[in-house]
Amino acid sequence: MIQRLRHTEIDREGWDNCIRHAVFETIYPYSWYLDLVSPGWEALVLDDYREVMPLTWTKKLGFRLLLQPILAQQLGVFSLNPLEPSQLNEFFGAIPSGFRYIDICLNRENRDIPDSWKSFDRHNYELDLSGPEDSYNTNTRRNIQKGLAQGFELRNISVREYLVLKFHGTRDYKPEVNWQYLENLFEGLVGMQKAEVFGLYQGTDLQAAAILGYAASRTIYLNGCNSDAGKENRAMFVLMDKLIGRSRDANKVFDFEGSNIPGVARFFEGFGGKLTIYRRIVKTSFPFIGKIAVS
C-alpha cells in the first residue's frame, strides 16, 4: 500500500538508499537536494521505501499546488526494480486530491502515462563516459581548437563569482528570486561536497563558468554561463571539454541536463550526447483553467 508521508515522517536513510540503488539514479530526488529546492517536501512511499515519489508542493492564493522546482529536472517515481505501467498508475492515483494543480516532470523510467493526464516530451542528453573518447563531431572539435588557442586556464571558483558572471549585463532578471534561489542551492551543494564550481580564465578575465553536480552514477551539468568575450573565444566549448575529461574517472555518465532548445541541443550533441526522453505531466481541477501553455 502506498503511504503519504509528511516531511517530518520521512525516513531519510531509507529514502536515500532507494534513490542510490534505483533503476534510474540521479541527483534531484535525494533528500538533501529536495531540502534545498523544495523545503517541506512530502512523499509517497511503497513497501518500506522500495518505490518512492517526492511531492514538491507549494501554496499560492490558499491553494496547494504540485510543481517542479527550478533545477530539479527529473523527479517522479523511483524504484529498485523496473516499474510496470500499473505501478506508475497507482502512484498517480495516490497523489492527494488536495493538490488542485499539478505540473511536474517525471524521470526517464516513468514511461507509461495514463490517458487521463496531459503529458509532453522533454529532452535530455547523456554521454556514456565508458565509451570512446573521440565522440565529438567535427564542428565541436574545430571550436575547441579555436578556443584552446586563447590560452585558457580552468580554476575552481566561488558560487558568488559564478553568479556575478551569470547575471552581469542581464537587464530583466529578478535578483530577489533568481540570485537568492541559485545561491542557496549551489552553496548548499558545494557545502555538502555534492557540487563544484569551475571557471575558465583568459589571464584574469573569467569568460565561462559551470556548476557540476555529483550523483553516484553520473556527473550533472547543472548550470553554465559565459561572457560576451567567452562566446567570441569559444570558451564554453573548451570548458565543456575539460569538464567531460575530468569526469571520466569518476562516473559512468555525463548528464548535460537538457535541452528542448534546438541550439543548445546541437551543442550537447556535438560532444556525443545522446537523446533521452522524460515526460512532463499536467493536471488541474480548477474549472476556469482551459488550455495549458507548454513551456
Image (tube, rainbow, N blue to C red):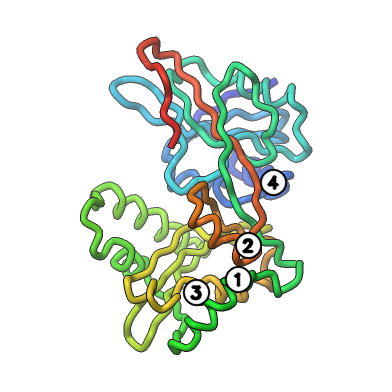
In the picture, residue 151 is in which quadrant?
A: bottom left
Q: Which mark is residue 254?
A: 2
Among the two numbered marks 2 and 3 on one chain, the one whose residue lies closer to the N terminus: 3
Within 10 Å of disc 2 (Cα), the crowding (few <14, some 14-19, many 20+) is: many
Please state which amino acid type lies under the numbered disc 2.
Phe
| Residue beneath disc 1 | 244
Among the two numbered marks 4 and 1 on one chain, the one whose residue lies closer to the N terminus: 4
| Residue beneath disc 3 | 239
Alpha carbon of mark 4 to alpha carbon of mark 1: how far? Answer: 21 Å
**Residue 144 vertical placement versus 114 (above, below):** below
- Residue 174 picture location, percent across and down: 24, 49
| SS type, badge 4 | loop
Alpha carbon of mark 2 to alpha carbon of mark 3: how far? Answer: 14 Å
| Residue 50 visible in the shown view | yes
Label pair 2/1, CB-CB below 8 angstroms: yes
In the picture, residue 207 is in which quadrant?
A: bottom left
Alpha carbon of mark 3 to alpha carbon of mark 1: how far? Answer: 9 Å
Please state which amino acid type lies under the numbered disc 4.
Phe
Q: Which mark is residue 90?
A: none
Label pair 4/2, CB-CB below 8 angstroms: no
Q: Residue at x 60, y 71 (%)?
A: 244
| Residue beneath disc 4 | 24
